[in-house]
Amino acid sequence: MVVAEKGKSEMGPEAINILMVEDEEAHAEAIRRAFRQTENNFNLTWVSSIHEAFDSLQKSVPDLVITDWLLPDGKGTDLLPSGKALFPIVLMTSHGNEKLAVEAIKAGAVDYAVKSPSMFAEVPHIAKRALRQWGLFTEGKRAVEKLRESEERFRTVFEQGPLGIHMAGLDYRLISCNSAFCYIVGYSDQELSELTFMDITYSEDVDADVEEARKLLAGKMPSYKMEKRLVRKQGGMVWIHSTRSIIRDTDGKPLYFLTMVEDISERKHTEHALKQTLSELTRSNADLEQFAYVASHDLQEPLRNVASCVQLLADGYKNKLGADADQLIHYAIDSVGRMKALINDLLTFSRIGTKGKPFEEIKCNEILEETLISLESAISATGAVISYDPLPVARADGTQLLQVFQNLISNAIKFRGDEPPKVHISAAKIGSEWIFSVNDSGIGIAQRHFDRIFIIFQRLNKRTEYEGTGMGLAIVKKIVERHRGRVWVESEVGVGSTFYFTIPNYSFALLA
Ligand code: ADP
């Protein structure tokens, strides 16, 4: 017989489902009555045998089972699940018997009651108490399980993680080291347990580490990170990045140090190699600059002599040695002039890094106006129309900025098309930089040459068409890079070119 009864209040999600196993109808009725008189929201299902109880349990798991001890087809304790209990059980018996009570509790029942009319009236309270106890019991069990799980997780990370981990006492003695750490230092866990973590720290790094560990111990910081060297058992050093924290008990008393260790030797070696390459590069760059400077500087004097000799020859012997000789003298003068220009440009180039002036606040408009004055003859000879927007104040070397403008604007005029050149200069603030632009309406440059033109002596046109040494843009690039900027070109053949260069906006950097 299965009788289901709902509590008085509306069935909600929190309704308590109770399975009552009782073969005596009168007892069952007394208990049902007691439940009806409570304000609790419950569903009471009554079955009268173990067999029916099992059937009901198959269909759904109740929140509580209240069962008679002795039933026609078995004992109430038969309902106690052998493995994990999913519900609490309260056992009822007709006679008080201490041995039975102990047996019931041992079997897993949460409570035991002796049947009597007053007890039946009490069943709802007994049920509530059992549910409360069960709640505490399951909460406690869950907490232990959680602890075990988190311990398990930590153990997995400790044992199998790629990071070296060690725990050490407050005297720095190593208590436990995982295999990744043993691998890093080449010692066994056993060998390490005889050492402190300072014993395996490279002597030069010990003081810094001790100082930080003391601060950590004093509670001045939650953890600290450092890069340091460890000495391997086999000799040699390993660079590590260590993150150390301190584990405290619930009262905040320090228990031990927990340290995560990452082997960064490879990164350190790469950094070292990079530093070395950089310093070699800087040195060879300086050597080259020095060479270019000395060569161009020392070549000037003999060149001046050659130039004046050839000029004397031209002045004194013109029309006296025949047409061929005149032609040769003309070539010599022309070549000497070109050589002078090349050497001058080379000298300028080699001086950018070494002879530059310190940066100061420069009114770029004033520099541009000075540039235009210096280019006046080229401007009037070609009928060039130059326009410009207000330019900013920027931190730069004024003389070098003038050189940049001179080279870019003179190119814009020189590489003009059939029409008189139109040149426009402007500047815009983008993020942390000023971007300057020099736009022209000249012959333009094919995209494949965009990078090449900034290399020294690289020219795209014949000397007979356009004069030049091929140094102008290389000088621009070197000056802009000295100012920590970039230079590039956008252009279309037959339409014109725009050269861009940037200068960091230091006021932005200060604000940031
Ligand atoms: P140079 O002007 O002495 O030839 P640069 O280094 O100043 O040398 O320029 C390199 C080459 O880039 C030039 O020979 C020219 O072919 C090309 N170039 C530079 N500026 C312009 C421009 N505004 N328009 C077209 N081509 C240009």
Image (cartoon, rainbow, N blue to C red):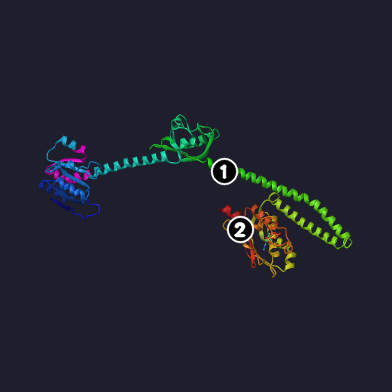
Residue placed under numbered mark 1 in the picture: 271
Q: How crowded is the residue under tag 2: few (<14 C-alpha within 10 Å), some, or many (20+)?
A: many
Residue 81 is marked as: none
- Confirm whether residue 389 shows in the render: no
User: Looking at the picture, how far across and down is residue 142, in whole percent?
Assistant: 30, 43
Measured Cα–Cα span from mark 1 to mark 2: 32 Å
Report if residue 469 is visible in the image.
Answer: yes
Q: Which of 343 and 260 is in front in this view?
A: 343
Q: Name the residue under label 2.
A: 434
Farthest residue, direction top: 194
| Residue segment shown in magenta | 104-130
User: How far from the left and from the top, in percent, is residue 96?
Assistant: 13, 37
Q: Is residue 340 magenta?
A: no
- On the rendered structure, is 213 left or right of 359? left
Identify residue type, mark 1: Glu
Q: Which residue lies furthest to the bottom in this view?
A: 419
**Above or below for 19 versus 375:** above
